């Protein structure tokens, strides 16, 4: 056999072996690679009612990569404190966001969904404005080029800045605040979804199971303003006859909720509209930590009238006290939405959401703070957040 024929025979054998190996390997590869897709980026291509009418519900459901964004306006319940100032039946408004990104395999009808939700607020305070002892810093009102050489805003500044008037008010004052309902909420979810076969009238059910990590931070603040002018402070041998004091007791209570959850999503298509409902129930543990601290701000003056100068200011802060606790948590999350098919890949949608932590949330901090100002709450409370949502959905 010549060298040329031998070489041709070897190449043919190698090609056959490679084909067999590739065929065997294809039996074990995933049905689809989530990162190997060819998007056409025609998100804004118009879509007609006829296009949607000809599509079966299974074809209209999200496949491949998809994402949503919603703006949240949720009312949150107030904390249950151990005094008469609490009003847990009241609700206060807070604003937040919800982001979702998911991937659904088109052939085997299962995939993953990641959800991040945050709520900034509510930030409800009971506020009283108190004028400070010298009421107005006259030097802060002088225009540029005054004869006495003192330069006021906007080309100069009072040094230190804390001795100047409150910007836009032209007086020196404190906003003495007591917190009524102040919290921040963040939640991370990862769920495994399964898409069932459409029902007779086109509805699709997607059961899912997943994990949820939520953090709810509650802020409890009480302030008290005292001065020698109204008799709430007495003359001091060192501080003198004219001084004021602002006491601030504060507690930051963190609740880290680690929970497993189960739920379902139901989707129904009708013309350009998509109706959906989500329900998830979760249970787990709440790791709680409360940080309590007091700040005392004392300002000493050389008099008690307009134009009195600040002699010096003393700020004292106590050592923070940490308290830890653990509680059992159970709750649910309900969402309902209606979306309108605007273009080929974009939907506008609106709806509502209810988040209920039925047990295991600590608000207000320990029952007794560093002074009689701060009254805390129980470590096993409930929190309800309810309101509306509005957003956009993108499916490639």
Image (cartoon, rainbow, N blue to C red):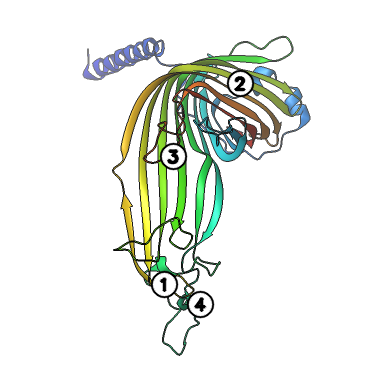
Instruction: Identify the residue under disc 4.
Output: 141
Mark 4–mark 1 Cα distance, whole angstroms, equals: 19 Å
Q: For residue 147, what is the image quadrant?
A: bottom left
**Dots 3, 4 in contact, CB < 8 A:** no
Say which quarter of the image contains residue 263.
Answer: top right
Residue bearing the label numbered 1:
303
How far apart are the alpha carbons under marks 2 and 1?
A: 65 Å
State if disc 1 and disc 3 touch (CB < 8 Å).
no
Q: Nearer the viewer, mark 2 or mark 1?
A: 1
First of labels 4, 2 by sequence position: 4
| Pointer 3 residue | 374
Residue at 32 percent of width and 63 percent of height: 239
Q: Earlier in the sequence, mark 2 or mark 1?
A: 2
Tell which circle, 2 or 3, labels the residue nearer the N-terminal end: 2
* SS at circle 2: strand
What count of labels does the image hold?
4
User: Is 302 situated left or right of 208 in this image?
Assistant: left
Q: Secondary structure at mark 1?
A: loop
Q: Earlier in the sequence, mark 3 or mark 1?
A: 1
Q: Is residue 96 left or right of residue 352?
A: left
Distance from Cα at disc 4 to Cα at disc 2? 59 Å
**40 relative to 271, above or below:** below
On the image, numbered disc 2 is attached to which residue? 278
Sequence-earlier tag: 4 or 1: 4
């Amino acid at each position: 056999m010549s060298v040329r024929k031998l070489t041709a025979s070897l190449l043919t054998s190698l090609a056959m072996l490679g084909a067999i190996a590739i065929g065997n390997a294809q039996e074990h590869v995933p049905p689809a690679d989530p990162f190997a897709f060819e998007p056409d980026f025609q998100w804004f291509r118009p879509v007609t009612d006829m296009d949607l009418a000809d599509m079966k519900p299974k074809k209209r459901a999200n496949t491949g990569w998809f994402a949503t964004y919603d703006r949240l306006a949720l009312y949150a319940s107030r904390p249950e404190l151990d005094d008469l100032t609490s009003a847990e039946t009241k609700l206060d408004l807070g604003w937040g966001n919800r982001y979702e990104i998911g991937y659904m395999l088109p052939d085997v009808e299962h995939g993953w969904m990641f959800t991040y939700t945050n709520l900034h607020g509510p930030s409800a305070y009971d506020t009283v404005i108190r004028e400070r002892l010298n009421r107005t810093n006259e030097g802060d009102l002088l225009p540029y080029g005054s004869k006495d050489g003192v330069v006021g805003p906007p080309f100069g500044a009072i040094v230190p800045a804390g001795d100047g008037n409150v910007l836009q008010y032209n007086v020196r004052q404190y906003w003495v605040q007591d917190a009524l309902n102040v919290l921040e909420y963040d939640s991370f979810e990862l769920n495994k979804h399964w898409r069932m076969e459409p029902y007779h009238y086109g509805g699709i059910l997607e059961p899912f199971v997943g994990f949820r990590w939520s953090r709810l931070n509650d802020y409890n603040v009480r302030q008290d303003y005292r001065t020698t002018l109204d008799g709430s402070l007495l003359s001091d041998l060192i501080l003198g006859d004219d001084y004021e004091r602002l006491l601030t007791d504060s507690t930051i209570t963190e609740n880290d909720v680690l929970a497993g959850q189960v739920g379902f999503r139901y989707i129904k298509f009708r013309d350009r509209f998509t109706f959906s409902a989500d329900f998830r129930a979760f249970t787990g543990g709440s790791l709680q930590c409360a940080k309590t601290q007091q700040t005392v701000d004392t300002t000493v003056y050389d008099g008690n009238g307009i134009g009195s100068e600040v002699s010096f200011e003393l700020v004292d802060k106590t050592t923070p006290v940490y308290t830890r606790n653990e509680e059992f948590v159970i709750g649910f999350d309900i969402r309902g939405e209606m979306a309108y098919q605007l273009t080929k890949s974009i939907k506008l949608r609106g709806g509502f959401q209810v988040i209920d932590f039925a047990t295991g949330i600590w608000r207000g901090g320990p029952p007794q703070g560093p002074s009689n100002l701060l009254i805390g709450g129980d470590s096993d409370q409930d929190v309800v957040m309810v309101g509306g949502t509005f957003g956009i959905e993108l499916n490639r």
